[in-house]
Image: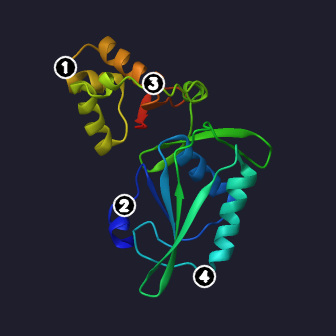
């Protein structure tokens, strides 16, 4: 149900747009979803969750297709649905986590930037994140995923969206070094994405469960 989805609010996997201003702006969101763990874009919904509806589905879709096909590299494959609430149309665009990550976005100067999802924002990836995305390993150790520490981490991230090594060490009562080792291994196995903002000593880590 559309209302149930909206009630969740914007977050790691969901973003609202009352309308698509430009292809360039929405390309960042689409690429970030594809580079992280997928997501849904609702067009015709305001930031506060109220439904505005779209005037022209075709116009909105043309800007989205331009973003996915011309501004994102590699190109993105999207699925569309039209939802109707009180006579108002809302476009639901679903972006799956990509097997071709990282996807970069080309700006007006031809420069390319990789974006990832951190909580409810699409932000430029740090260099370390790009390196991880370029070295994705598909084999995941099932015993690691089932460990108590990792289950605790996943539960925390589902609520908070990000964590650093110091906070994780306190969460599971281990040393900073041990916590960092676990996080690094989870990134290596493509369970977590690592995002490091410029001029910050500690990484902000977001997760991507397979």
Query: Residue 46 versus residue 132: which sits nearer the camera?
Result: 132
Q: Which mark is residue 119?
A: none
Quadrant into which the N terminus falls: bottom left
| Structure colour scheme | rainbow
Q: Which mark is residue 189?
A: 3
Q: Which mark is residue 55?
A: 4
- Nearest to viewer (mark 2 / mark 3): 3
What percent of the width, then of the height, locates residue 103? 64, 41
Query: Residue 109 versus residue 148: which sits nearer the camera?
Result: 148
Q: Earlier in the sequence, mark 4 or mark 3?
A: 4
Q: CA distance from mark 4 to mark 3?
A: 44 Å
Q: CA distance from mark 2 to mark 1?
A: 32 Å
What percent of the width, then of the height, locates residue 11? 40, 52
Q: Is residue 159 visible?
A: yes
Q: Earlier in the sequence, mark 2 or mark 1?
A: 2
Which residue is the site of mark 1? Answer: 173
In the current view of this chain or complex, which residue is farthest to the right? 109
How crowded pointer 3 is (Cα within 10 Å; few <14, some 14-19, many 20+) is rated as many
Q: CA distance from mark 1 to mark 3?
A: 23 Å
What percent of the width, then of the height, locates residue 67? 69, 56
Q: Residue at x 42, y 36 (%)?
A: 206
């Amino acid at each position: 149900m559309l209302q149930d989805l909206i009630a969740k609010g914007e977050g790691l996997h969901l973003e609202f747009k009352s309308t698509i201003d430009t292809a360039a702006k929405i390309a960042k969101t689409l690429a970030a979803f594809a580079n992280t763990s997928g997501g849904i874009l609702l067009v015709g919904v305001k930031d506060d969750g109220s439904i505005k509806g779209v005037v022209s589905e075709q116009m909105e879709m043309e800007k989205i297709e331009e973003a996915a096909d011309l501004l994102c590299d590699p190109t993105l494959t999207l699925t569309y649905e039209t939802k109707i609430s009180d006579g108002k149309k809302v476009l639901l665009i679903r972006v799956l986590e990509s097997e071709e990550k990282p996807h970069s976005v080309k700006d007006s100067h031809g420069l390319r930037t990789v974006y990832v999802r951190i909580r409810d924002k699409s932000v430029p990836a740090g260099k370390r994140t790009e390196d991880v995305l370029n070295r994705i390993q598909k084999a995941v150790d099932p015993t690691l995923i089932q460990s108590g520490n990792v289950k605790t981490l996943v539960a925390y991230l589902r609520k908070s969206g990000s964590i650093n090594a110091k906070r994780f060490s306190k969460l599971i009562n281990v040393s900073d070094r041990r916590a960092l080792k676990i996080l690094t291994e989870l990134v290596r196995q493509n369970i977590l994405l690592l995002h490091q903002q410029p001029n910050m000593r500690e990484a902000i880590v977001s997760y991507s469960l397979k």
